[in-house]
Image: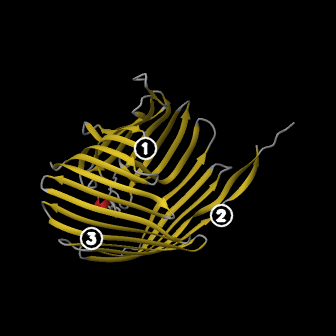
Amino acid sequence: MLLIVQSHAQAGFYGRIDSRLQVESDRSNSIGFFEEYADIRFVDEQKGVESVASFSFRHDDQHELNIHQLYYVKKMDGPILSYKLGRFERADNLGFYTLDGVALTSKNNNVLSKLYLGKPSRVDGYSAVTGDILYGIDLFSSNIQLPQISPNITFKPSVIRMGWQRLENEWLNERQSEIRFNWGVSSTADVKNHVLNGLGFNFNGSYLTSEGQAEQINFKLYADAEQNRRLQIGYETFTSDKQELSFREQFYSVYVNGRQSSWSGSYFFKTNALTHWEVKARKTVRESGLIGYGLTIGRALDKYSGTGYNTQLDFLNLNQEKALSLYAETDYSFSPLVTSTFGLAIQHKKTWLAGSNHALAVDMNLQKMIRSGLYFSTALTTVLNSNAEDEFILGLKVSYYFDERIKEKSND
């Protein structure tokens, strides 16, 4: 008897199209632009193919067309699982960027390999990644068993990542290169005692051979206790690659230009089923030589009847520089068709160069579904400063989401 099993595979186009008008006033400069953005994707799961075209056109003084992504993916059976050709986004220890080239994914036993080769390009809002060619390999394994360090502690299978990367560039007729080694390991463990019920850690980073030192390090060790409590210690050293911070990040003292290291201790707990608290103390060292201490207290209330609340108090004292910020945010649904988020921040900041400044900031976003797939949204951000230029951003956007994928039957 022949058994016929019918499965469903999707095929067709889907994506979104935006039209956005934005006006900005920042540091005595006022600019405005109209931008059209499209992200169009095609997938055929039965044939194992996917195509992506993501681009935008900004109507301003430059009238520039930006191609964000343009690639083709083919999935296959056998040791080689898939290949990708074109321009696609990548995120690693270099930062967030696009790569014009090829990526290949393969698997041998329990080891997943990802090879890539191409020319890197900068993504708006992030630090530039410059180079003529970038290539490397990442290896992943999710079935590594760590040794048992105690009869009461049993580790679960761990996830391990190892990578090698080379970036080449030509500067003043001289060929230059950077070689990076990167790694990552994470695991959790069951604990048998009356105090703790679980442990976990995450350790990742990168090593730059030309500097002869670690470029980035991130380590976290946490212990879970009864009643939804967690203790965590951590260490990180990094250089932020973000040039444009979100509204909330502007009032959080972790985000600064330049390299910094931080040691921290955190305590997470719940006072009821919906309310989460975090208390975090840290010591920070910046490459400028500033050394200081900080404290962050955060409270989050899960959504109840369509509303959620987040508040955060952040303080940092670095020698002659001080910052105290209070941030609050709520998301509220007026109806199933109308949603919104509101943010408010108050900050007092004192720096050696700029002196003392008081800031009051408001961020509002409102979105309405006009009909199925069609949305209108408006965003307003304003920052009032006592010792700096005020900032103002107003944006209007119309978004259309479409999905023409159909389910095709196949017999296995």
Quadrant of residue 177 within the rendered picture: top left
Residue that numbered label 2 is attached to = 404
Q: Secondary structure at mark 2?
A: loop
Give the residue at x 30% y 52%. 240
Quarter of the picture holding the C terminus: top right
Left or right side of 246 for 81: right
Quarter of the picture holding the N terminus: top right
Looking at the rendered structure, the kind of residue marked 3 is Leu
**Which numbered disc, 2 or 1, marks the residue closer to the eye?**
1
Earlier residue among tags 3 and 2: 3
Quadrant of residue 401 within the rendered picture: bottom right
Q: CA distance from mark 1 to mark 3?
A: 35 Å
Residue that numbered label 1 is attached to = 228
**Residue most extreme to the top:** 151
Left or right side of 262 for 409: right
Q: Secondary structure at mark 3?
A: strand
Looking at the rendered structure, the kind of residue marked 1 is Asn
Categorize mark 2 by other alpha carbons within 10 Å: few (<14), some (14-19), many (20+).
few
Give the residue at x 22% y 47%. 284
Residue 298 vs 183, above or below: the answer is below
Where is residue 307? Give x, y as percent: 47, 64
**Which numbered disc, 1 or 3, marks the residue closer to the eye?**
1
Looking at the rendered structure, the kind of residue marked 2 is Glu
Closest to the observer, 232 or 318: 232
Left or right side of 51 for 88: left
Quadrant of residue 155 within the rendered picture: top left
